Amino acid sequence: MHPICETCGTQFAESSAPPERCPICEDERQYVGWNGQRWTTHEAMAQRYSLRFEDDASVLGIGLSPDFAINQRAIYLQTDAGNILWECLTLVTEEAVAELKARGGVDLIAISHPHFYASMVEWSQALGGVPIYLHEADREWVQRDSPLIRYWSGDELALSADVTLIRCGGHFTGSTALHWRRGGERGDALFPGDALQVVSDRRHVTFMYSYPNYIPMKPSDVHAMQERVSRYGFEDVYGYTWGRNIVGGGRDAVDASFERYFAAVAG
């Protein structure tokens, strides 16, 4: 079996028994569930959960129903780099794979950071062995390695003329955002995972080393992120879960958020 951590939703390498610990949850950026370390399996989850496909601010979101673990949603993007599954989920179903194939299939998976690796290898295999793009700086956090994973390096990776992966750092060393030059009325978009997390007012983003444990990001890491993101324009910012999006004015909102953060940490 491939054990799955019930708190973070990460699928582990095949074993006859679950590990004693989940290193992702024991890291200070995450936490062990209040009832202790608990495990499940893909087969057990299929009895309790399903996947839903819904429009989320003009992109197709995919998520678990009912909510599970961190409750991120994946996004299906049809781009000039091919059809991309941005972020990943713990559960794979035959119905979801059929739905994606009916829409044109998936050509690659790209994931922002280790908290969303989930069942990435399971998804890749179900979709025909598509490549999974992860930043090499976060390789130590991969719990189920595979030849399907393509570790990239540096601060940028152009997947096409319109799609670029940007290493933001901060939350994790390899924390990645996806920039999509969409053009037309919709304008360009930024998909930052948790590196720049869209907050509840949906007019700002914030920068945290740990979100559940409220550890702020180092100012030096935020400065580096600001520099890396500054070269890109975008109208919309799509956050890590349902509805956490800034629709319109995204570039100004992110710039204002950087300024607000530095004013706050300066006292």
Image (cartoon, helix red, strand yellow):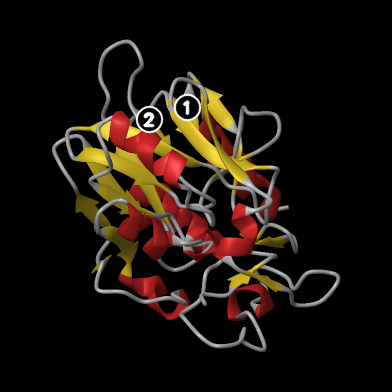
Q: In which quarter of the image is residue 224?
A: bottom left
Residue name at image x 63 percent, y 79 percent:
22
Q: What residue type is labelled 2?
A: Ala
Count neighbours of disc 2 (C-alpha within 10 A) and say few if under 14, some if 14 to 19, many if 20 or more: many
Q: Residue farthest to the left?
A: 161
Residue name at image x 54 percent, y 57 percent:
90
Q: Quadrant of residue 154?
A: bottom left
User: From the viewer's perspective, is the residue at label 1 or at label 2 nearer?
Assistant: 2
Residue name at image x 70 percent, y 43 percent:
66
The Cα atoms of the two marked residues, 1 and 2, are separated by 8 Å
Up-down: is 78 above or below 171? above
**According to the image, label 1 marks what residue?**
250
Q: Provide residue 179's location: percent of width, then percent of height.
A: 32, 39
Q: Nearer the viewer, residue 141 or 267?
A: 141
Q: Nearer the viewer, residue 245 or 72?
A: 72
Q: Which amino acid does label 1 sit on?
A: Gly
- Left or right of 188 on screen, residue 49: right
Q: Provide residue 10's location: percent of width, then percent of height.
A: 55, 67
State which tag comes first along the sequence, 1 or 2. Answer: 2
Residue name at image x 38 percent, y 76 percent:
139
- Left or right of 80 on screen, residue 259: right
Q: Element at badge 2?
A: strand
Q: Nearer the viewer, residue 14 or 107?
A: 14
Q: Provide residue 54's location: percent of width, then percent of height.
A: 53, 26
- Left or right of 158 on screen, residue 21: right
Q: Are marks 1 and 2 in contact (CB under 8 Å)?
A: yes
Evaluate whether residue 259 shows in this view.
no
**According to the image, label 2 marks what residue?**
189
Up-down: is 19 above or below 111? below
Evaluate whether residue 81 shows in this view.
yes
Q: Element at badge 1?
A: helix
